[in-house]
Amino acid sequence: MSNFLSGRPYRLPGMAGREIIVGVSGGSGARLAKRFVEVALAAKGLARLHLVVTDAALLVARSEIGPGIGSPEAWAGALEAPRGMARRLEIHANADVGASIASGSYPTSGMAVIPCSGGTLGSIANGIGRDLLQRAADVCLKERRPLVLALRESPYSLVHIENMRRVTLAGAIVAPPLPAFYVASPSVDRFLDAYCVRLARMLGLEPGGEQFRWTGAARAGKTPRPGKRKR
């Protein structure tokens, strides 16, 4: 992973276990966010996961996960994670702009905004920090820490494209959650897992289980056999 402008690699904080931030904004994709937090909590190398869930994200979660999700704590309560791993989770109110992760002096290893709505993208791209999620993302940019934005919007307007350009120049990675169609035995759950595992590796974690790596066309059985060209 490198800085877009300098070409130099990011230097992730050297610590026994990484602390990452996960911001959940109001784009559709509550199941994706839930699955990523589950994958990250179980990953090797994680010491703490700081979770920020916006009000709009709670509204989406009530539609896409369960009607009883009325608070960030209820959102976290829907996670399927062993109790021991859940202890790695720290929940922050989105209104708490005085939280630890609002300061660059607090050493985290990076942040994912998943899903990232078009409005959240615009705020981050233009340095707007009206709440904790936006402020934490701004901190990652100014401290040159990895910031991955799972933009959940399609099709893109020119405004989206310009904001993606702007935030990429600032050092973020825009990574829309597109399916990895090469995954064997494809299903919605496996597409989600493939994306979440890849995103976890972007933040320096070592997720367990299947890694969903592309190993080449030959191994995938897609190498064309030599022979006459069909007319």
Image (cartoon, helix red, strand yellow):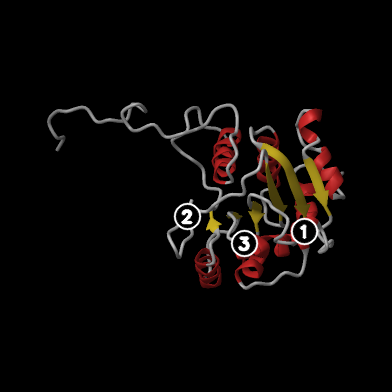
Which amino acid type is marked by label 2?
A: Ser
Question: How far from the left and from the top, in percent, is residue 79?
Answer: 77, 36
Which residue is located at x 64 percent, y 36 percent? 45
Question: How far from the left and from the top, in percent, is residue 203?
Answer: 59, 46
Foreground pick, 69 / 141: 141
Residue placed under numbered mark 3 in the picture: 143
| First reached walking from the N terminus: tag 1 or tag 3 | 1
Which amino acid type is marked by label 1?
A: Ala
Question: How far from the left and from the top, in percent, is residue 177?
Answer: 56, 48
Residue placed under numbered mark 2 in the picture: 2
Residue 10, compared with residue 213, is above or below; it is below
* Tally of numbered discs: 3
Which amino acid type is marked by label 3?
A: Glu
Q: CA distance from mark 2 to mark 3?
A: 14 Å
Q: For residue 31, what is the image quadrant?
A: top right
Question: How far from the left and from the top, in percent, is residue 82?
Answer: 77, 28
Please tell me whether mark 1 or mark 2 is closer to you in this view.
2
- Are the residues at dot 2 and dot 3 in contact (C-beta closer than 8 Å)? no
Please tell me whether mark 1 or mark 3 is closer to you in this view.
3
Element type where label 3 sits in the image? loop
Which residue is located at x 45 percent, y 57 percent? 8
Residue placed under numbered mark 1 in the picture: 56
Which residue is located at x 67 percent, y 63 percent? 139
